[in-house]
Amino acid sequence: MDIAADNNASDRKRLLVVDDEAAIADLVSGIFVAEGMEVRSFCDPRAALSSLDEADYDIAIVDIMMPAMDGFELCRNIRQKSDVPVVFLSAKDAESDIVAGFTIGADDYVTKPFKPRELVARVKAHLRRRERRSDGPRGAEGVLSARGIEVDTRAHTAALHDVPLQLTPKEFDILTNLMRRQGEPVSSRELYQAAWGEPANASSSNTVMVHIRHLRCKLAEVDSSCEFIETAWGVGYRIAADKADGRDG
């Protein structure tokens, strides 16, 4: 089923929606048509896969539990044809399912029942990052991105899935340093010295730990599906590198 926002859809973002429940496919399609996007929705994943030979999409929103071909298999097949971002939208909320989704190449995972505003925010965040990668390094100047987190070091703002984070100056400095070193563990000593601008002392590790806890809580208020700041035991903390984004900025 094709849904276009208007007759000038050629310059609009194109979304692929795949869900074997027509009501959900129509609901998701309607949400993004209202955002001014062009949507093609399918209840048959095989037809959706074939459509990749006919059209270029900016992002795909895919259910997992579907007959004939489940979302995991569809994602694998999509990856053989295209690098379009894939967002799973599924009632399967077990950690093993979420990990499996990312492992096979998905860019995001949203569980049902979902909040429309959160889904829109996540999709828009992926679309912006896709545009920045197309624009090259200059398009991402001053911006650090990973796992849905965006830090603008010039504007001194941070967001998760396009939802602004209200951070204290120290929390912002700690997050910025973790983002700059994404994929690498950063010691409490380094984080303290970078954020406080003074040598670490006997209590600095506990001080950093408290601020990390606050950061985790603020991130979890937006998305509690995963741990964005990981503990590297005996070393420090890290934000895992985003395979899709690499390092920006």
Image: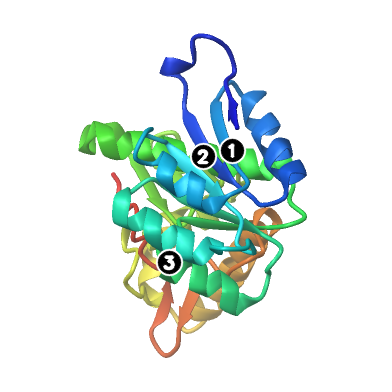
Which mark is first along the chain, 3 or 1?
1
Q: Check whether the beta carbons of the residues at disc 3 and disc 2 lie within 8 A of each other.
A: no
Three-letter amino acid code at the position of disc 2: Leu
Three-letter amino acid code at the position of disc 1: Ser
Determine the image quadrant of residue 78.
bottom left
Q: Check whether the beta carbons of the residues at disc 2 and disc 1 lie within 8 A of each other.
A: yes
Position of residue 215 in the picture relative to residue 28 (left or right): left
Q: Which mark is residue 239?
A: 3
Binning the other alpha carbons within 10 Å of mark 3 as few (below 14), some (14 to 19) or many (20 upward) gives many
Query: Quick one: SS at disc 3?
Result: loop
Which mark is first along the chain, 2 or 3?
2
Residue, disc 2: 16
Q: Identify the image's colour scheme: rainbow, by chain, secondary structure or one colour.
A: rainbow
Of 37 and 82, nearer the camera is 82
Query: Above or below — where is 216 with respect to 47?
Result: below
Q: Residue at x 29, y 40 (%)?
A: 133
Determine the image quadrant of residue 207.
bottom right
Query: Above or below — where is 100 with respect to 125?
Result: below
Of 49 and 120, nearer the camera is 49
Percent position of residue 197, x then y:
38, 60
Looking at the rendered structure, the number of numbered marks drawn on it comes to 3
Residue, disc 1: 41
Percent position of residue 227, x then y:
56, 70
Three-letter amino acid code at the position of disc 3: Ile
Q: Residue at x 25, y 31 (%)?
A: 135
Binning the other alpha carbons within 10 Å of mark 2 as few (below 14), some (14 to 19) or many (20 upward) gives many
